[in-house]
Amino acid sequence: MLDAVKKSLTVCLLITAFSPQADQVNRSEQHKPPETLIIGVEDTAFYPHYTTSKAGEYTGYARDLFDQFQQHSGIRIEYRPMPVEQLFDALVSGEVDMKYPDNANWASHHKEGLNVTYSQQVSRYVDGVLRKPEDRGKPLAGIDQLATVSGWTVWDYLDQVNSGKIAVSEKKNLRQLVREVIRNKADGAYFNIVVASHYLENVRLSPLTLVFDPGLPHTRGTYHLSTIKYPGIVARFNEFLQEQAEQVADLKDLYAVEKDLDNGYLGMETWKEEWLARKRVRRVNSDQSLLKTVSTYTTEKAI
């Protein structure tokens, strides 16, 4: 009788051990919160969203936001800057615990079969074409060459690129993109409009060298934190974003990461739009004056 009871208990334990619930527990134990959470970040200049110094220090809006989450949650965070093209493989291999930025639409064909968890949006963005002020408003048909940063996809122009109507040249950084357009080697620079505007205003100190053209196709999207190993931490991060919504909004305002994305000018401050409008009026008046002079000269010549 005792042997029968032992056998019955053994069978029950085996069934429990291999049940879906037990399997879920085992998996969760394998992915307990680590002592240090490693977030893989892009080793690139993308300020005010983020940037990495020559010393390897990660700074910007994203750094401050994740630092606030670290204080709020008690989870120690380490930032690991990596080349953009290596980040996703590092996430899959487990070299990093999380990836930022990420989006469910990015490299979707590489994510098939993977259970990737995404946070709520960390910030919004707009990617589009920046042109010379005098070209702003001209039709898409006038664009034959676009410049962008290596690794970027000009999503809104893929049909024209695939059909051969638009050629794309890839450059190492934003500085090279701007130079390509200034030197007439490209008709526009495809990039994040907030980052490009910040560079032109605060680094190059020439805010009207190039301006965003909202009349051309552009992409609105959102940046997210992603993970394969720790969906529970992403859930805690989502709670943090909701509970600290006011502080998060203040941080966005401080870094101006969503600057002018909702106004009527889309990526353009009012003074810039007014300056361009005045410049257009001056150009029209100048052209009319020139035509009047030529007309008067021709009439007098004929007399």
Image (cartoon, helix red, strand yellow):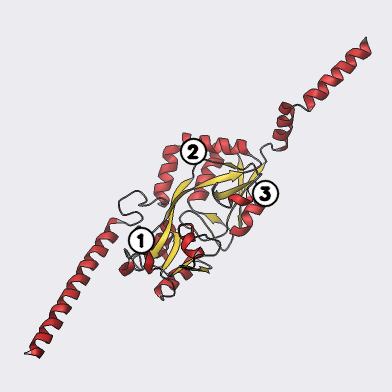
**Depth order, front residue of 292/189:** 292
Between disc 1 and disc 3, whose residue precedes?
3
Kind of residue at badge 1 = Asp
Between disc 2 and disc 3, whose residue precedes?
3
Cα–Cα span, label 1 and label 3: 37 Å
Tag 3 residue = 92
The label on residue 213 is 1
Q: Quadrant of the C terminus?
A: bottom left
Between disc 1 and disc 2, whose residue precedes?
1
Q: Is residue 258 above or below residue 173?
A: above
Q: Answer with left or right where residue 44 lies relative to residue 19.
A: left
Residue 116 rendering spot, x and y as whole percentages: 61, 43
Q: Is residue 79 visible?
A: no
Residue 278 rendering spot, x and y as whole percentages: 22, 65
Task: Tell me what residue is drawn at x 47 percent, y 35 percent.
Answer: 242
**Depth order, front residue of 269/114:** 114
Q: Name the secondary structure under disc 2.
A: helix
Give the quarter of the image for residue 5: top right
Mark 1 against mark 2, which lies toward the viewer?
Answer: 1
Residue neighbourhood size for the residue with mark 1, other residues' Cα within 10 Å, grouped as few (<14), some (14–19), many (≥20): many
Residue 50 rendering spot, x and y as whole percentages: 50, 55
Q: Residue furthest left?
A: 303
Q: Is residue 60 above or below residue 176?
A: above
Task: Tell me what residue is drawn at x 48 percent, y 50 percent.
Answer: 61
Residue neighbourhood size for the residue with mark 3, other residues' Cα within 10 Å, grouped as few (<14), some (14–19), many (≥20): some
Kind of residue at badge 2 = Leu
Kind of residue at badge 3 = Val
